[in-house]
Amino acid sequence: MTKIIVTGLSGRMGSHIADLVRKTHGTELAGATEAPGSFAIGTTLPEGHQVVDDLAKCIERSDVVIDFTSPEATLYHASVAAQHGKAMVVGTTGFSEKQKKELSEYLKKIPGVWAPNMSIGVNVLLKVVAETARHLGDDYDVEIIEAHHRHKKDAPSGTALALGESVAAALGRNFSKVVCYHREGQTGERPAGQIGMQTLRGGDIVGDHTVMFAGIGERIELTHRANNRDNFARGAVLAAKWIHGKSPGIYGMTDVLGL
């Protein structure tokens, strides 16, 4: 039995993950947290545990912590998990480079799965776009388009960035040097090797990602659309079961899925 604590219980992902933990054979919801001041603090879960405002108050009951909160909250939760030697699954995005480095240091001390997207389909897409890029080579221009709901705080999405990095690596390019996030005015011709990144925000879009390979006379578009958040939650719970008992280190969903 894998005992799981879910941080940010009232968030868009937290509630989905908690419900799926309850429905998944071999997992148990051992507790949950919310931000200080949340209406959920002090409420009692069906499992009999109270929702608390600090992971340190309940972490000893867990084997694995699943975290889809905010960069600042995730860093604190990772520090607590590292201090107590508990495994962690991180799906939070929007980290700065400094924050990524700090999170890496915490996760190196414990078994940790860190991925911008826990969806099985998206992680297969990451592999497919890399393979496609290798076959098509430099004759095809690459554009990545992502769309999310109006409340998403970071842009581009972590998934879009991961797709761009996957394509760049397959083509032998430095992603940070070839990515273009914005075009306006007299931009001139498209530079060779550029990877375009377009961000859309609106309504309740759960998450759409398209990688376009545009050649002369044809184009290939590889698209993943999330219709709800259950696929992310399923991946997170699968990762929690998989990471339980593993050696300390940072793993990805490709490790979990055996890709």
Image: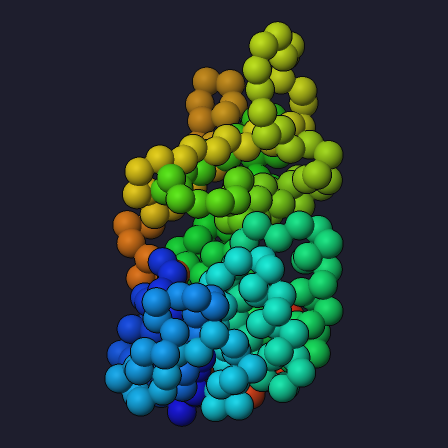
Up the image or down, 216 lies above or below 196; here it is: above
At x 36%, y 42%, the residue is 149
At x 52%, y 76%, the residue is 54
Compared across the picture, whether 53 is left or right of 149 comes to right
At x 73%, y 34%, the residue is 177
Camera sees residue 159: yes
Compared across the picture, whether 251 is left or right of 145 comes to right
At x 36%, y 79%, the residue is 42
Up the image or down, 239 lies above or below 28; here it is: above
Task: Out of 259 and 160, give the one closest to the viewer.
Answer: 160
Callout count: 0
Up the image or down, 191 lies above or below 143; here it is: above
What's the colour scheme? rainbow
Camera sees residue 210: no
The image shows residue 175 at horizontal and vertical percentages of: 68, 40
Compared across the picture, whether 214 is left or right of 83 comes to left
Quadrant into which the N terminus falls = bottom left
Residue sticking out furthest to the top: 186
Rendering quarter of residue 150:
top left
Task: Out of 149 and 216, give the one closest to the viewer.
Answer: 149
The image shows residue 132 at horizontal and vertical percentages of: 52, 42
The image shows residue 47 at horizontal and vertical percentages of: 30, 87
Up the image or down, 53 lies above or below 95; here it is: below
The image shows residue 64 at horizontal and vertical percentages of: 50, 81
